[in-house]
Image (cartoon, rainbow, N blue to C red):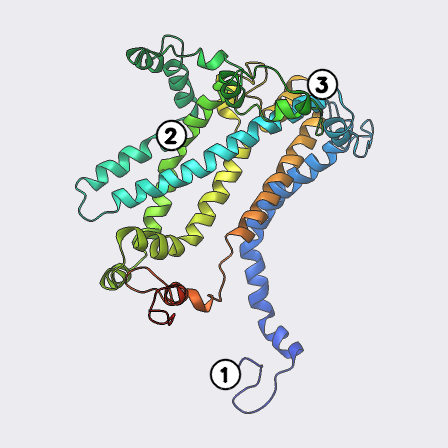
Amino acid sequence: MSDAHGSTRSGRIRTPGAWSKRNRPQAISGWIFIAPAVVLLLLFLVLPIIMAAWVSVSDWSGRGSPFSSNVSFVGADNYATLTTQGGLAEKDFAVSLRNNVYYVILVVPIQTALSLTLAVMVNRRLLRARGFFRTAFYFPSVTSSVAITVLFLFLFSPEGAVNKALSYLSVDGPNWMSEPRGLVHLLLGAFGVDHSPAALQASPLLGLSWWEWIAGPSVAMTVFIIMAIFTTSGTFMLLFIAALQSIGEEIDDASRVDGATAWQRFSRVTVPMLRPTLFTVITLGLIGTWQVFDQIYTGTKGAPAKTTLTPAYLSYEASFERQHWGEGAAIAFILFAIIVIMTIVQRATLREHTTVPRRHRFVFGDGTTIADRKKQSKAPGTEEDGHV
C-alpha cells in the first residue's frame, strides 16, 4: 500500500517512472474502453464544428466538398456582410436579433417563475391528486412542437377560440398571426404616438433605428412567446420538484419554529437552496430560446414583415434556400458566442457568495436582522436613543 505521496509502508519512495510503468496496463485498458466514445465525439461533434468554422470563412456554395480546391478562404467577409456592410443581409440579421431578444427577455423569466410556482404547488403534502397535476402540467412538454404549433395557429386564427373568447368581453381580437406591429408601438399608438420621433430616427446599431429597436415583440411573435412558456414550463417544473424534494423537511420545520412566515420560508430558505437548479433552468432556457427554429419554420417562416424572424431560422434560410452557406455558418457562430456570453454573465450573477455579511447572518423570529434591530434602537424616541 502507498499513501498519497507515493511512499510505501516499507518507507521506500516510489519514483514516478516506476509508478507509471506499474499502472500502464490499466491506463491502456482505460483508453481502449473509452476509445469508441472518443471516436464518436470526434466524428459527430468536433469534425462538424471544424467544418462549420471553415465554411463561415469560405465562399463554399454548397456544391462538392467544402475542403476542395475550388473553395477559397475569404476571411471575415461573411461576418462583415452581416454586421458592418449594410444592405439587406445586415438588416435581416438585426431584425432577427431584435425579435429574438424580446423572445428571450419575456420567455426565460416567465417560464422560470411559472415552473417554480407550479413545482411548489404540486409539491405540497396536503394537495390531493398530485400525480395527476404533475402529468397534466408536463404533458405539453412531451407533445410534438409541430403539433403544438398547429394547435396554436388554430387557436389564434381570426375565427379561433381566443378571438371567440374575447368577443364575449366585447373585445375585437386582432388577426394574431398577420399583425406585424410591435406591442410597444401599439402602446405608444394608444397615446397618439404613431410615428418615430426625430430623436429615435438614428440608426446606431446594425442599420436599425432606435424606433425599430424599441418596437417590442410583434403580435405574431407574442403568440410564439405564449406557446414557448406553455410547452417548456412543465419540463422545468420537474427539475424544481426534484430540487424541492431534496430539501429536508426538518429545515422547513426549523424555520417554522423560529417564527418565519410562509413567504419568509420560501424567499429566505427555499429559494437560496434552489440556486443550482435555478442556474440550470435559466441556462437551459437561454439556450433553448436563442435556438428557436421549429415553431417559426412550421408557423410563419419569419412572417409577417419578418417580425418572427430569428437568427436560427435566418441561418437555415441563408444556407438552404439562398445557398449562402458562409453567411449561414457565420450566423450560427455569432449565435453561439451570444449564448456563451449570456451564460457567463448569468453564472457571475447567480454565483453563490461563500461569505455572508455579518449583519445578515442572524434573522429573528419577526424577520428582522441584527442590522434592523440596531437601526430601530437608534431611531428617535427609543430607550437606547436616550431621549425618552
Quarter holding residue 213: top right
Q: Can I make out residue 137 in this image?
A: yes
Mark 1 packing: few (<14 Cα in 10 Å), some, or many (20+)?
Answer: few
CB within 8 Å, label 2 to label 1: no
Quarter holding residue 335: top right
What amino acid type should be assigned to the residue bearing mark 3? Answer: Leu
Relative to 10, say whether 118 is above or below: above
Relative to 299, say whether 288 is above or below: below
Mark 2 packing: few (<14 Cα in 10 Å), some, or many (20+)?
Answer: some
Q: Nearer the viewer, mark 1 or mark 3?
A: 3
Front position in the image: 366 or 27: 366
Total numbered badges shown on the rendered structure: 3
Q: Which residue is mark 3?
A: 88
Secondary structure found at label 1: loop
Q: Which residue is mark 2?
A: 230
Percent position of residue 269, x then y: 34, 57
Front position in the image: 328 or 85: 85
Secondary structure found at label 3: helix
Tell me the distance, in whole angstroms, between the alpha carbons under discs 2 and 1. Answer: 58 Å
Percent position of residue 329, x then y: 68, 31
Front position in the image: 241 or 65: 241
Q: Which residue is mark 1?
A: 1
